[in-house]
Amino acid sequence: MSHTDEIEALTARWADAYAAVRIEEATDCFAPDGLYMVPGKPPAIGRDALLELHRFWLRNGGPEFSTGHVGSGADAGHGWHAITWRGVYPTAEPGRTIVFTGKLMHAFTRSASGAWQIQAGILNLDPPV
């Protein structure tokens, strides 16, 4: 498997865990000092902040989540993978959902053990429709 295939597989693992509300598993895809950048918010840095962010997003359950490939690349130690995404999120009000779309880029690094980890997630949201 190529380095690019490996980071794409990690993104898919993160997306599957996220959509299934397996928050710990989704967060485990990140480096211990990993960060997530969301428009209009300070970066969430480190495991506790990433857990809090994922718990907030998934507080009403998992979204219907779909992605599309934009591009990716990797060498032996670093990589990137950009996707489009769409999430239909349940709300606390029964039967009501919120739809978010946008682009997401993950930057990857290798851990000391050689495993790929997400070092940074950078999220851009499309304007509301």
Image (cartoon, rainbow, N blue to C red):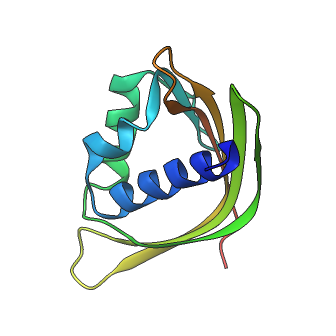
Rendering quarter of residue 67: bottom right
> Residue 52, percent across and down?
33, 35
Question: Considering depth in this image, is 82 or 45 the residue closer to the camera?
Answer: 82
For residue 80, above or below residue 83:
above
Which residue is drawn at the image coordinates 23% and 68% (left, top)?
92
Question: Considering depth in this image, is 59 or 29 the residue closer to the camera?
Answer: 29
> Residue 72, percent across and down?
75, 51
Q: Residue furthest bottom?
A: 95
Which residue is drawn at the image coordinates 61% and 50% (left, top)?
1
Left or right, 73 with respect to 14, comes to right
Which residue is drawn at the image coordinates 30% and 44% (left, top)?
25
Q: Is residue 44 visible?
A: no
Q: Is residue 49 visible?
A: yes
For residue 113, above or below residue 84:
above
> Residue 117, percent across and down?
51, 32
Q: Residue furthest front?
A: 1
